[in-house]
Amino acid sequence: MTNDSRCYIQNSILKCQRGQEFPKFFLSLMDYKNNYFLSKNPKDIIHFYEGFENRKELIDWMKERPKGSCEIMEVEGEKDIIVVIPTADFEGEYAKRCREEIFKGLHIIFVVSGIGNNYFNIAHNSNIGIKKAMEYNPKWIVFSNDDMYKIDDVEILINELNRMEPKKINVIFTNPSSYHSHYVRMAKANFLFYIYFYITNKNMFRNFRKILKENKLNIVYDQVPFDSKISYLFKKGYNLINFESFGIFSYNYISSINGELFDETFINAGEDVDVSLNLSLQPNKIGMINYKIGNYVGGTLGNDVTRALRTHAGRIYLNYKWENKLYELIKGKGKN
């Protein structure tokens, strides 16, 4: 490790689910299912979903799935604002850009999962990094994906946050991009959406139809960006701002939820929407700043058909958690 990287390994987390041990048979069965879930072959992922009789079985599997190993590596810097970044490779291009360009001068906590980690869970790793950040009592904790790129200088971020009152705010959004701080709608698709889906991507449509066979793993509500070309294909729903790949949270808010920002049942999809939905219920504690940062969509986890199929598990769990609450919100003042 080079001296000028100014980093050090703080501690290692080597066991799944914070030290919980699993029987050998459990691990072999879990590995069998997980290998299908992570396959690069869409047919294998469909086979994974077909192995569950209903939504409850799938969610139980998600809850039991190990969280993977990781280690914390820190880059020293100003600790009023601490940046938490899950990454596969500390020496990789994305992580290097974060510490040498985007957030240079701030204290950065990288939660490193390692390349090829079969049980990587961004929600779990992010919570670990956030709890580490809490030890320094910062004013703000920034969550960021590693696949970002610089637009504004970090001084703009610092100056903008210095004019905000952390005791009165839970979350801060920045200038919107297509992948963070943008307005979305949680809504049901209308019948035109399925026609559009079939016409524009027959293979993807057929893959999802197989997963939705007999409606046992179906979803009711999904998110669609306001500025999307297909937003008119969704019914009226509940509007909110989703932080997605980049969000800023006050230390007070993080402390109030004991550092558990993300629900770790999610598997790399849906955890951000879940947090944003919770935050939307306290609209008076949301702040906005004039800071721009860019992101490479799918730079780390990919953006292909297999990634899309895997995200279905998160969408199913999100619906399970929110279907009753969303119904009430959409009926009431949240209807748009």
Image (tube, rainbow, N blue to C red):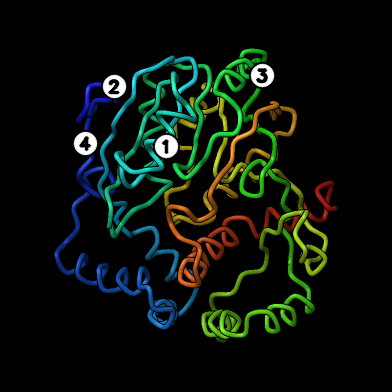
Q: Residue at x 19, y 30 (%)?
A: 1
> Tags 4 and 3 in contact by the CB under 8 Å rule?
no
For mark 4, give the secondary structure.
strand
Residue 86 horizontal side relative to residue 324, left or right: left
- Circle 1 residue: 85
Question: Which one is earlier in the sequence, the residue at label 2 or at label 4?
Answer: 2
- Determine the residue positioned at 74% across, 61% down: 187
Q: Which residue is mark 4?
A: 12
Q: Which residue is mark 3?
A: 168
Identity of the amino acid at label 4? Ser
Contact between labelled residues 3 and 1, with CB atoms less than 8 Å apart? no
Judged from the image, the secondary structure of the residue bearing numbered disc 2 is loop
User: In terms of secondary structure, where does tag 3 sit?
Assistant: loop
Kind of residue sitting beneath label 1:
Ile
Q: Which class describes the residues within 10 Å of circle 2: few (<14), some (14-19), or many (20+)? A: few
Amino acid found under the numbered disc labelled 2: Arg
- Neighbourhood count class around disc 4 (C-alpha, 10 Å): few under 14, some 14–19, many 20 upward: few
- Element carrying mark 1: strand
CA gap between label 4 and label 3 equals 34 Å
Q: Position of residue 134 (x, y in %)?
A: 41, 23
Front: mark 4 or 3 = 4
Q: Residues within 10 Å of mark 1 (few under 14, many from 20)?
A: many
Q: Residue at coordinates 21% horizontally, 36% vertically from top-left? A: 12
Decide which of tag 1 and tag 4 comes sooner along the chain: 4
Query: From the viewer's perspective, is 237 left or right of 110?
Result: right
- Residue 6: mark: 2
Who is closer to the viewer here, 96 or 131? Answer: 96
Choose top left, top right, bottom left or bottom right for residue 283: top right
